[in-house]
């Protein structure tokens, strides 16, 4: 029998709604509860079920380009080219500018990861440290 969200909630000692909020990032859940739920999700293998459902995208999905600045000609040309290529495939390109601010970039990325309409993210990072982008 396959594990369910109800099973995850019971094992973590939280409500089904809390598990849902942790998975979908729809509401604030305290860091302690989030860790507890995520641990159960990983330990039970439920993460594979989540990942299997995460990447079902339609043509209404958008592709995102997160860049540190808009003053660069290279970024402007790249965004124009990406817009044209993605439009041919039925996707919309959204551009976000982090202004070389690591915290703001993190905020942008966390929101994009929680958005089910985000089909993909192209990132020109503000920080040159892969540990920052582990998630």
Image (spheres, rainbow, N blue to C red):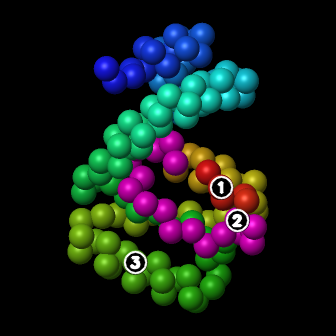
Q: Nearer the viewer, residue 5 or 92?
A: 5
As for residue 97 lying within the magenta part, the answer is no
Q: In the rendered structure, which segment of residues is drawn in magenta?
A: 113-130
In three-dimensional space, the C-alpha distance between marks 2 and 3, rounded to whole angstroms, equals: 24 Å
Q: Is residue 94 above or below residue 80?
A: above
Q: Residues within 10 Å of mark 1 (few under 14, many from 20)?
A: few
Residue 39: mark = none
Which residue in the protein does label 1 denote?
134
Q: Is residue 71 above or below residue 51?
A: below
Q: Which residue is pictured at 33% across the width and 54% down the height? A: 61
In three-dimensional space, the C-alpha distance between marks 3 and 1, rounded to whole angstroms, equals: 25 Å
Which SS class for mark 3? helix
Question: Whole-percent x and y of residue 134?
Answer: 65, 55
Decide if residue 132 is in sight here: yes
Question: Whole-percent x and y of residue 55?
Answer: 35, 49
Which quarter of the figure is the N terminus placed in?
top left
Q: Residues within 10 Å of mark 3 (few under 14, many from 20)?
A: some
In three-dimensional space, the C-alpha distance between marks 2 and 1, rounded to whole angstroms, equals: 7 Å
Q: Is residue 129 above or below residue 61?
A: below
Q: Nearer the viewer, residue 114 or 16?
A: 16
Residue 82: mark = 3
Q: Which residue is pictured at 24% across the width and 65% down the height? A: 90
Decide if residue 26 is in sight here: no
Earlier-in-chain disc, 2 versus 3: 3
Nearer the camera: disc 3 or disc 1: 1
Q: Is residue 54 left or right of residue 101?
A: left
Question: Whole-percent x and y of residue 84?
Answer: 32, 79
Tell me whether circle 2 and circle 1 mark residues in contact (CB < 8 Å). Answer: yes
Which residue in the protein does label 2 denote?
130
């Amino acid at each position: 029998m396959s594990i369910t969200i109800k099973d995850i909630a019971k094992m973590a000692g939280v409500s089904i709604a809390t598990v849902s909020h942790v998975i979908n990032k729809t509401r604030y859940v305290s860091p302690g509860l989030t860790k507890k739920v995520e641990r159960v999700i990983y330990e039970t293998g439920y993460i594979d079920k989540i990942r299997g459902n995460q990447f079902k995208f339609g043509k209404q999905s958008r592709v995102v380009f997160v860049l540190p600045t808009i003053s660069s000609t290279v970024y402007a040309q790249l965004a124009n080219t990406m817009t044209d290529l993605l439009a041919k495939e039925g996707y919309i390109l959204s551009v976000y500018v982090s202004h070389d601010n690591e915290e703001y970039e993190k905020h942008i990325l966390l929101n994009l990861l929680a958005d089910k309409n985000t089909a993909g993210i192209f990132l020109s990072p503000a920080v040159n440290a892969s540990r920052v982008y582990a998630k």
